[in-house]
Image (spheres, grey):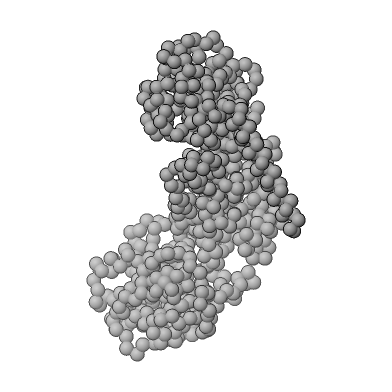
Amino acid sequence: MSYAAPCDAQKCRELRVAIGNGGSYRRRIEHVNVFKHFRIEEWKKSTKEGDVTTFLDKTLKCTVYRIRGPVPATKVGKTSLIMSLVGEEFPEEVPSRAEEITIPADVTPEKVPTHIVDYSEAEQSDEILHEEIVKASVICVVYDVTKEDTIEKIRTKWIPLVNGGAEKGKKVPVILVGNKSDLQSGSSMESILPIMNQFSEIETCVECSAKNLKNISELFYYAQKAVLHPTAPLYDPEVKELRPLCVRALSRIFTISDQDSDGILSDEELNFFQALEDVKSVVWKNTSEGVQDNGLTLTGFLFLNTLFIQRGRHETTWTILRKFGCDDSLELTDDYLYPPLRVPQGCTTELNHFGYQFIQKLFEKYDVDKDMALSPSELKNLFSVFPYMPWGADVYSTVCSNEKGYITQHGYLCQWTLTAYLDVHRCMEYLGYFGYPVLTEQESQTEAITVTRDKKVDQEKGQTQRNVFLCKVIGPRGTGKSAFLRAFLGTNLTKQQSAAGLSSNYTINTVQVNSQDKYLILYEVDVDTEFLKASDAACDVACLMYDVSDPKSFNYCASIFKQHYMDSRIPCVLVASKADLPEQKQQHGLSPSEFCYKHRLLPPIPFSCFGQDSPSTLLYSKLALAAMFPHRNGSELSTTSFWLRVTLGAAAFTVLGFTLYRAFLKLK
């Protein structure tokens, strides 16, 4: 069978293959129309060091079989191939079996060490053969192109021996090697093609000559390629279609890369993949639904990758998949989803401007109707690239929503802020699903995270650079803690009673402190007894809440304060809830006001969410202020002089900044 001439779309590409003692070669490989077959022209050429980039950190084990004909003296030249590869010349004397050879990583194209293991029926038992099959990453089956019986044994003996008991999709890849091509003018491809069509695990067939050194290094290049860029996970040759997991992975990549969410990859978005100029024309000629509005649709994108694989360029598809974090099983790797991030004790985690900029663009992409809120369908589309829905129904009780119950843009940013603070690794996982490192061209999701300095340093310096603070709301059952959390989102008691959905122990919103927006997280501590664990008490500010209409309510707050906060550096604020009801005298020895005065706390702050108006945000600002200035005691925070100093300090900082800005303009 003669090789078909390459078409225009099958452009030549160059490949460097370094073998043996470091000798460098450059090959030109032309793809031909027959699936998985190649015409190879070889010439020797020097190469600059560093011409190849690292791709995977793997060790390949390549087992090469000798196939005997009916006459024992007949050999196919398997050992000669190995020795020609290493010695770069045809050996005059050939042993019955070559020793195991290791090709170092630094002299292979993919920077992967490769072990080549020879096998001899004369010297080794069937048990040893089976052990090598189990350990092999790829198997090269060598036949003699001049002997039809050696070709037939590929079908009847060797392939069944290698993968006879393997499950579909878990078979060891096989490379067919037709040796002694120098002894005949034609090709063995007519006989080989039916075998390749019968056994999907056969990746490639290479005809070579150990005597003339023809295609020797290419043989081992394709052995490496079969492992590093396997066809089996991507493509089902029996139905000639991409496998479902591959379709899922590529669809996710398409959705991420379609940054304007119009269902089409524009020229700018295609350039992100460094696609060929004639990609759209090739797709358009083969599928009518592949090109729309001068862009590539999902159908076209999937067809393009199918075409890559069918023409033996599946490394192109693998490059795309691995760039977006996929492993060999087409799942996102842990290294991609969970990059290492060290968070020392006493430090917290926040999204920085890179992170907020990225999630802001995501919101704009999926807010199709531009109403500054995400409807349930828009939220579903946002998380369509996830394997699960990350936000549950409780999110609607955690952040702000509009009158339709949709999460607002502000609420969306708050939810991301909450995740980054409480579980930064989960936050980085979410960013990974959205393709953060690829789209932002940054090393990993850690670039979107700021680890704050130790809280002890903030206390020593009397100032903080943090933007997110945690307040724990503690009090006996029935004091209105849940209503206090919901009121932080601007809902009064009437709206809370009519609202549906799951409740949440968290709420998050922004408050104004010194003309700056700060995120304040409220967490309702669910307490069954009078004793509180130390971990439940840890926070930036504690809100101790009691019910003014219950004479026993304050006892609990006083007990918790003495147990956890009296000798700590965590500021406390007392809140007198249900202030719309008649106040009862508390049974504690001291009144709440006397207790606060004695322990230098702010006087109890009244709170009620009863009424038609939205609750005041002043109380929440005071909580954030106490968290920002934990070194100040309550008496200082309540004095006019303190507030005056804070205001004057902020004004002085503003004047200084304006002065420096004007000076900078003059220098320019």
Residue at (68, 56) in percent of width and height: 266
Q: Is residue 429 above or below residue 481?
A: below
- Pick the residue in front: 559 or 65: 559
Which residue, as the protein is rendered here, is positioned at the far bottom? 92
Assign the C terminus to one quadrant of the image.
bottom right
Out of 662 and 292, give the one closest to the viewer.
662
Seen in the picture, residue 155 relative to 635 is either above or below; the reply is: below
Q: Quadrant of residue 162?
A: bottom left
**What residue is shown at x 68% (from left), y 58% (from top)?**
268
Whether 359 is drawn above or below 304: the answer is above
Q: Position of residue 474 (x, y in %)?
A: 46, 25
Can residue 385 be seen by looking at this rendering? no
Q: Is residue 101 left or right of residue 361?
A: left
Q: Is residue 479 left or right of residue 254?
A: left
Residue 53 seen by the camera: yes
Q: Position of residue 403 (x, y in %)?
A: 65, 27
Residue lying at 68% horizontally and 63% vertically, measured from the top left: 281
* Residue lying furthest front: 641
In front: 103, or 226? 103
Q: Is residue 193 above or below residue 44?
A: above
Residue 153 x/y as whole percent: 36, 72
Q: Residue at coordinates 32% horizontally, 85% vertically from top-left?
A: 94
Query: Residue 305 location, x and y as percent?
Result: 57, 60
Q: How many numbered circles are shown?
A: 0
Q: Quadrant of residue 335?
A: bottom left
